[in-house]
Image (cartoon, rainbow, N blue to C red):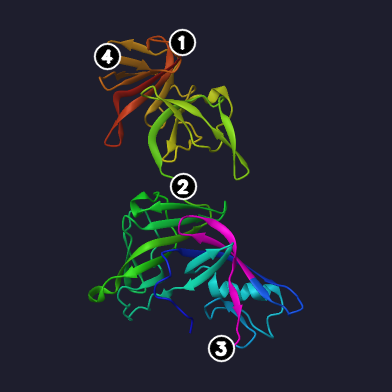
Amino acid sequence: MVATTSTAASSDYVYIIGVNGKLSTTVDGQPPSVEARVLLADGTVKVVDVAIEKVKTASAPLAVGDYVVKGTTLKVFTKGSTTDAAGVTALATTAIKGKTFGYSLSSEKITLEVLADLPASGTAAAAETTYAATLSENVTKDTTKYTANGKTVLADKNTKFVVYNADKKTATVYTGAANLPTAATGTGYAVLKTNSTANSNLGTASVIFVSTATGYTADATDEYVYIDPTKYTTTLVDGETKYIYTGTKADGSEWTSAAGDQITDNAANKGLYTYDENNKVNTTAKAITTDTTIVNTYYLYDAALTVDGDLLGAGTGYYNITENTQVVYVDSDLSEVNGNGGFVVLASKDGAATSDVAAIFVTVD
């Protein structure tokens, strides 16, 4: 029987990403140790030593001389049969990897508190009790109701989704299901507290951990911006060179990207780009100067735009200039649309392009 606490000593919870066992030889024998990469509920990822202790009183299945995670019966070393670090790692993997705990942390050593597992299907959960549970359905954006062991787990606006990126060994915290990206998916490991006796098989998760290979791609936006990709600054992010661009929005305001991947450094790639909700540029342009017919539904370029009354000639067509059309002079020396070159963005209605002009970016004479 694993020792459990129905409620952790605090509201601090941790998910164990991976473990590594060690076995050293000293004058006192071969004491084991366990280090773990952990994911904390605030999104912190770190490697810490796990507090373990030697069993001094035999209590089946534990024997004197075994080692366990401190305060629990989770075995990480079996006296007489664990002979190397790989053996410690194997036992620690079974004991704690991929599981959720309460914890306290001191001097880079973590003391784990075992949470009760949500009872199996057909067995009622105790009222007002904190449980660990693996959700039956994948975590997805806007989903507020899940099941686990035949019980209902709710995710409200305060539920923290802590998403681990194994590639970068970082994590992102999203508060509330509505704030997850559309790309969200994966198994959720929840910490929940059940309701009162009248409905103890219903609980609300305070935190849901999700481990992914590369994290979630942020949602794209429909916002577009003019960028000259030959102009940028660079910065190091996790040891990799990333690129920051400054662009011009349709209302004439300056926009600065988040650090991200490089747009091919070529003047021919000057054009209109979109970006995601975190301000990272989509490095594939919506339109560049060779796109003299409509591309990507809404965009085109013309080296010699013409204005005839309320009509704009661009490419092979004419489009309506309306009171809502925005005109921005990327080249500040220019002040006329007619005869100059630039990009045109068509307005949208019900998800389709119209013959109205949403924006004109005047870039060259």
Callout 1 crowding tier (Cα within 10 Å): few <14, some 14–19, many ≥20: some
Q: CA distance from mark 2 to mark 1?
A: 39 Å
Residue at numbered disc 1: 365
Please name the residue shown 29% across and 15% down the image. 311
Marks 2,3: beta carbons within 8 A: no
Residue at numbered disc 2: 217
Q: CA distance from mark 2 to mark 4?
A: 41 Å
| Lower position in the chain sequence, tag 3 or tag 1 | 3
Residue 61 circle label = 3
Tag 1: amino acid:
Asp
Residue 296 vs residue 243, the one in the foreground: 243
**Residue 179 at x, y percent in the picture:** 36, 49
Marks 2,4: beta carbons within 8 A: no
Question: Residue 126 appears in which quarter of the rendering?
Answer: bottom left
Residue extending furthest left? 198
- Vertical placement of residue 17 versus 277, above or below: below
Residue 70 vs residue 149, the one in the foreground: 70
Callout 2 crowding tier (Cα within 10 Å): few <14, some 14–19, many ≥20: some
Please name the residue shown 41% across and 24% down the image. 300
Look at discs 3 and 1 and give the one toward the viewer.
3
| Lower position in the chain sequence, tag 3 or tag 4 | 3
Span shown in magenta: 34-60
Tag 2: amino acid:
Thr
Residue at numbered disc 4: 310
Look at discs 2 and 1 and give the one toward the viewer.
2
| Lower position in the chain sequence, tag 2 or tag 1 | 2
Q: CA distance from mark 3 to mark 4?
A: 86 Å
Tag 4: amino acid:
Asp
Look at discs 3 and 4 and give the one toward the viewer.
3
| Lower position in the chain sequence, tag 4 or tag 1 | 4
For label 3, the SS is: loop
